[in-house]
Image (cartoon, rainbow, N blue to C red):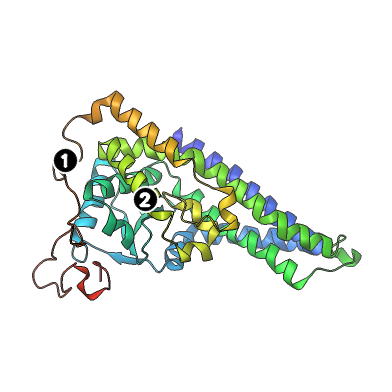
Amino acid sequence: MAIMTSYLKTTILLAGLTAIFMAVGFLLGGKTGLIVAFVVALGMNLFSYWNSGDMVLSMYGAREVDGYSAPEFHGIVARLAERAGLPMPRVYIIQNDQPNAFATGRDPEHAAVAATTGLLQRLTPEEIAGVMAHELAHVKNRDTLIMTITATIAGAVSMLGNFGLFFGASNSDERGGNPLGMVGAILAAILAPIAATLVQMAISRTREFEADRIGAEICGRPNWLADALTNIHNSANHIPNYQAEAHPATAHLFIANPLSGASMASLFSTHPDMGERVARLRAMAAQTGGFGSGGFGGGFGGGHTPPRDGRSPWGAPPQGSGQGGFMPQNRRGPWG
């Protein structure tokens, strides 16, 4: 029943984005533009279903890692996936100083999770476990398909609107031309990104609260995720994510809003208030007693803090790995 409900929501939301895309096509090209936009949207929906996850990972230059190249991080994800009853997802690292993470993929069997180097360097292993549990909750809830396809289509909607404004539009309704002319192009450029963002907001906000709740259950400690969200929020406010600024339609994929306050896209935040998310997790921990002392399996003591010398908490790689250690002496970051 839950899967059927998810598919129904996916269908309704994709229909909404397709309608927006077609409306922009009409504003730019009248009846002809409407037909062309419908065909393009149909093709994009099919293409995005199979490829949107890899497209987003490629946008951010994500690098796949395994138990050999990033044993501690990969191990955390593996243990969480086992606890959640999920297939092991592909694991990626993004070279980016802002602490953040997201999940993608069309279903649990084709899922991927990605974390930035900033997150791996600035958070404790317990907090990283909380973050990745949240991302696996999105996989478990089958949120990743709709969130990733939405990012692809919303980005196309915005690009189409900007394209129309830059190149102008036909000012005649002859042979299906745009009856509104340049006015239609201006309306498309202004309204299309706003409409697409509103759809993203409807998709993302309730799903983030649910992923927080289920993620806390997966890792076994709500406070781990609450602490992680607090640290991510404090850091993300003053560390820009230029990759996300270049692709604002993907912002709702991340566990925290990656866009700076200076960005126009941040006026319509796709994420719920961070203070409310943290408060809900603290209340959950108080009600449940933190799910007992076992938590995520005893591998993480509650008192761990990152070394004060700035090193990664993961320690050295296996002997003979050729990675030269996970320490940032070479300024390339602990992940190579």
Q: Which of marks 2 and 1 is in front?
A: 2
The residue that appears at 81% across and 60% down in the rendered structure is: 184
Q: Mark 1 points at which residue?
A: 297
176 sits left or right of 3 in the view = right
Q: Where is residue 168, by image quadrant? A: bottom right
Picture disc at residue 285: none
Is any part of residue 34 visible from this angle?
Answer: no
Residue 35 versus residue 261: which sits nearer the camera?
Answer: 261
The residue that appears at 78% across and 63% down in the rendered structure is: 185
Is any part of residue 145 visible from this angle?
Answer: yes
Q: Where is residue 302 in the image (x, y as percent from the top left)?
A: 17, 41
Q: Which of marks 2 and 1 is nearer the N terminus?
A: 2
Few, some or many residues within 10 Å of mark 1 (<14, 14–19, 20+) = few
Check the image and report above or below for 163 versus 284: below
Picture disc at residue 232: 2
Residue 186 versus residue 219: which sits nearer the camera?
Answer: 186
Marks counted in the figure total 2
Instruction: Tell me the quarter of the image containing the C terminus.
Output: bottom left
Q: What's the amino acid at mark 2? A: Ile
Few, some or many residues within 10 Å of mark 2 (<14, 14–19, 20+) = many
Q: Where is residue 260 in the image (x, y as percent from the top left)?
A: 50, 57
280 sits left or right of 246 in the view = left
Q: Distance between the residues labelled 2 and 1?
A: 24 Å
Q: Position of residue 306 (x, y in %)?
A: 20, 54
Check the image and report above or below for 162 versus 289: below
Q: State the SS at label 2.
A: helix
Q: State the SS at label 1.
A: loop
Q: What's the amino acid at mark 1? A: Gly
268 sits left or right of 216 in the view = right
